[in-house]
Image: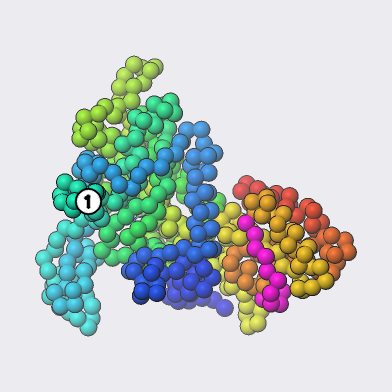
């Protein structure tokens, strides 16, 4: 049965809740707008997305190192970065229903766009997107700090520390994964736009003049990353920013977009941030931010190419893209076709019946998989058909069935999620085989 794209998001949201991918935050209190909690399957999926990013951006490269900076930073950081003065959206409030709207999203600024309201709107005002809080016991202006709206600044202020500690020379990068906060005026589309989210950012420092070459390199590499982890190529595209769309720090920016059920939307931006940030921090902190090139004996401020992705958005795209409904009537099955590296559970161990020594053999296989750090699941309830269906819907790439023959010859049936192909393998070779299949899926 084909799923209408209009219904697709509500189908995904209800599957996400039912199977424990994503729950509404504080649900028992009626929920908190735009805040979401990842459940047992969701937290594994998102961790796998972040691990896949970290491997591609840091572990497998000689020219990128990581950091983990604090969320609260010195308030001067946000003056220097331009976020205090520039990081704002134009907004209007409806005087009647009190709802707030992005002015640049409205066609008509005369009246409230809600058909049943039509109330008068306020003047357009700038609304800073940074969350404010207070540090220490006294809540006055001198104690105001901000929740970071991007992880990037934690990297810029540590440029000298990291460069000197790691002795890397441009071109080199510093990567970070962590929470960011923005008081978005119009959050929505499930986990797509939220006020608390996780970013996966990398700042790549290059000699001036080499920035355009690296910009193209990272644009292509980042698009490829989504394809490597299984996103359908026809649902991905690159979109260059127009001059008037560019952030205050950027010379050029291109978005990797995904065709969500609600339309083409940004997954990640790759920006050429020039030497803006390092020079701003030099000016505001009074500390030198230039790099000294030993060979030319010259100081220069590196240019920065920044691939900036969202862990929640990427996770949502992988979830939406994996969703498939196959067959009809009683043969219909819902299957999440996750790339094996991203799948929350890799193997489900399913004894055919709950007697005759099958559970014991299943338990042993399960233990063996866990001891080898293969996230697995054991289930001996319900019919085998229903158990396969549950695993298909969780996106588990491999199911292992223990049956009567297993007790005789120590073999088990391995079932592959996508093809539903089944074949027998020696129980003693299972771990090695799964590990090989996981490795092969990365090639
Ligand atoms: N350092 C540059 C920067 O932060 P951005 O385009 O504003 O650039 C980068 O953010 C990525 O962070 C976005 O492409 C998106 O994936 C994610 N992101 C930004 N705002 C978000 C929000 N409100 N909810 C979820 N993800 C968000």
Quick one: SS at disc 1? loop
Q: Does 383 appear above or below 255? A: below
* Residue 386 in which image quadrant: bottom right
- Res. 255 visible in picture: no
The percent coordinates of residue 428 (x first, y second) are 80, 53
The residue shown at (76%, 67%) is 359
In the displayed orientation, state which residue is furthest to the front.
137
Q: Is-magenta flag for residue 385?
A: yes
Q: Is-magenta flag for residue 159?
A: no
Disc count in the image? Answer: 1
- Look at the image and name its color scheme: rainbow
* Magenta region: 375-386
In the displayed orientation, state which residue is furthest to the right.
408
Q: Is residue 245 left or right of residue 397?
A: left
- Res. 116 visible in picture: yes
* Residue 305 in which image quadrant: top left
The percent coordinates of residue 274 (x first, y second) are 30, 37
* Residue 6 in which image quadrant: bottom left
Question: How many residues crowd around disc 1 within 10 Å: few (fewer than 14), some, or many (20 or more)?
Answer: few
Q: Is residue 340 left or right of residue 83?
A: right
The percent coordinates of residue 396 (x first, y second) are 62, 63
The percent coordinates of residue 122 (x first, y second) are 12, 69
- Compare residues 422 and 41 and report the one nearer the observer: 41
The residue shown at (27%, 38%) is 277
Where is mark 1, residue-wise? 137
């Amino acid at each position: 049965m084909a799923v209408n794209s209009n219904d697709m998001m509500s189908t995904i949201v209800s599957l996400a809740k039912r199977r424990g991918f994503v729950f509404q935050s504080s649900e028992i209190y009626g929920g908190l707008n735009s805040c979401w909690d990842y459940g047992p399957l969701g937290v594994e999926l998102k961790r796998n997305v972040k691990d896949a990013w970290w491997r591609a951006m840091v572990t497998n490269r000689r020219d990128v190192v990581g950091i983990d900076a604090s969320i609260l930073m010195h308030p001067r950081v946000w003056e220097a970065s331009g976020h205090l003065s520039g990081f704002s959206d134009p907004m209007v409030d409806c005087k009647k229903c009190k709802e707030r709207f992005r002015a640049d999203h409205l066609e008509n600024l005369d009246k409230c766009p809600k058909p049943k309201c039509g109330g008068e709107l306020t003047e357009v005002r700038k609304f800073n997107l940074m969350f404010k809080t207070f540090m220490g016991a006294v809540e006055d202006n001198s104690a105001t700090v901000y929740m970071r709206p991007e992880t990037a600044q934690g990297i810029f202020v540590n440029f000298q520390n990291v460069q000197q500690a790691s002795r890397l020379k441009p071109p080199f990068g510093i990567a970070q994964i962590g929470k960011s906060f923005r008081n978005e005026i119009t959050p929505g589309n499930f986990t797509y736009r939220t006020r608390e989210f996780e970013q996966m950012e990398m700042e790549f420092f290059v000699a001036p003049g080499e920035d355009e070459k690296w910009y193209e390199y990272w644009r292509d590499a980042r698009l490829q990353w989504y394809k490597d982890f299984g996103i359908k190529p026809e649902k991905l595209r690159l979109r260059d920013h127009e001059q008037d769309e560019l952030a205050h720090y950027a010379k050029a920016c291109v978005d990797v977009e995904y065709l969500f059920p609600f339309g083409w939307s940004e997954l990640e931006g790759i920006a050429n941030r020039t030497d803006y940030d390092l020079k701003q921090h030099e000016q505001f902190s009074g500390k030198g931010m230039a790099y000294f090139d030993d060979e030319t004996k010259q100081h220069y401020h590196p240019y920065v190419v920044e691939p900036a992705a969202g862990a929640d958005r990427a996770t949502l795209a992988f979830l939406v893209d994996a969703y498939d409904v196959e067959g009809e009537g009683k043969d219909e099955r819902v299957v999440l076709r996750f790339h094996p590296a991203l799948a929350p559970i890799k193997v489900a161990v399913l004894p055919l019946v709950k007697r005759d020594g099958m559970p014991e053999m299943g338990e042993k296989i399960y233990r063996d998989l866990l001891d080898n750090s293969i996230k697995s699941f054991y289930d001996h309830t319900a019919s085998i058909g229903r158990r396969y269906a549950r695993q298909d819907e969780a996106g588990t790439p491999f199911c292992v069935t223990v049956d009567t023959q297993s007790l005789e010859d120590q073999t088990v049936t391995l079932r592959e999620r996508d093809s539903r192909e089944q074949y027998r393998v020696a129980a003693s070779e299972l771990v090695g085989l799964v590990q090989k299949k996981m490795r092969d899926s990365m090639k």
